[in-house]
Amino acid sequence: MAKILVVDDAEFLRLRISKILTSNGHEVIEANNGVNAVNTYKSTRPDAVLMDITMPEMDGLAALKAIRAADPKARVVMLTALGQESVVLEAIKSGARDFIVKPFQPDRVLNAINRVLS
């Protein structure tokens, strides 16, 4: 199906999301922070990105802006914790196509990916 870049500093979350996506036929690439996300995006050109907002080295907002600067058509879905509404608005203004609030249900991840890929 599609190649998805999953970006989160929490390994267990990357694993959980990867499992959801691979069991639905997607190929998954992982990155553990914003710097690695930008470099991985540029080298692999995935079909979509699922990215956490709060990460060390470079947060998700900065990485989103860098990815969109490299590829204005990049399809990025942000992962956010409850209570980060102002950050979500900033992400949407910066080009994020959707956002998923943690904790999330597997269907929410699949729906968001299917929506940005269609």
Image (spheres, helix red, strand yellow):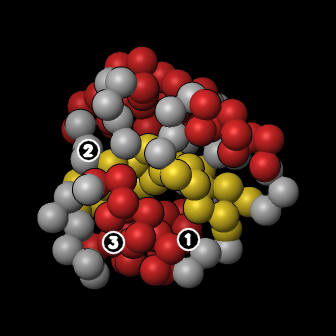
Q: Amino acid at mark 1?
A: Phe
Q: CA distance from mark 2 to mark 3?
A: 13 Å
| Helix, strand or loop for disc 1 | helix
| Mark 1 or 2, nearer chain start | 1
Q: Amino acid at mark 2?
A: Pro
Mark 3 = which residue? 21
At horizontal 26% and vertical 44% (from top left) the residue drawn is: 46
At horizontal 42% and vertical 28% (from top left) the residue drawn is: 67
| Helix, strand or loop for disc 3 | helix
Looking at the picture, does residue 109 appear above or below residue 42?
below
Nearer to us of marks 1 and 2 is 2
Give the percent coordinates (x, y) of residue 82. 79, 62
| Residue positioned most to the left | 1
| Left or right for 9, reference 32 | right
Mark 2 = which residue? 46
Give the percent coordinates (x, y) of residue 7. 48, 50
Pointer 3 and pointer 1: residues touching (CB < 8 Å)? no
Q: Which mark is residue 12?
A: 1
Q: Residues within 10 Å of mark 3 (few under 14, many from 20)?
A: many
At horizontal 42% and vertical 18% (from top left) the residue drawn is: 69
Q: Amino acid at mark 3?
A: Leu
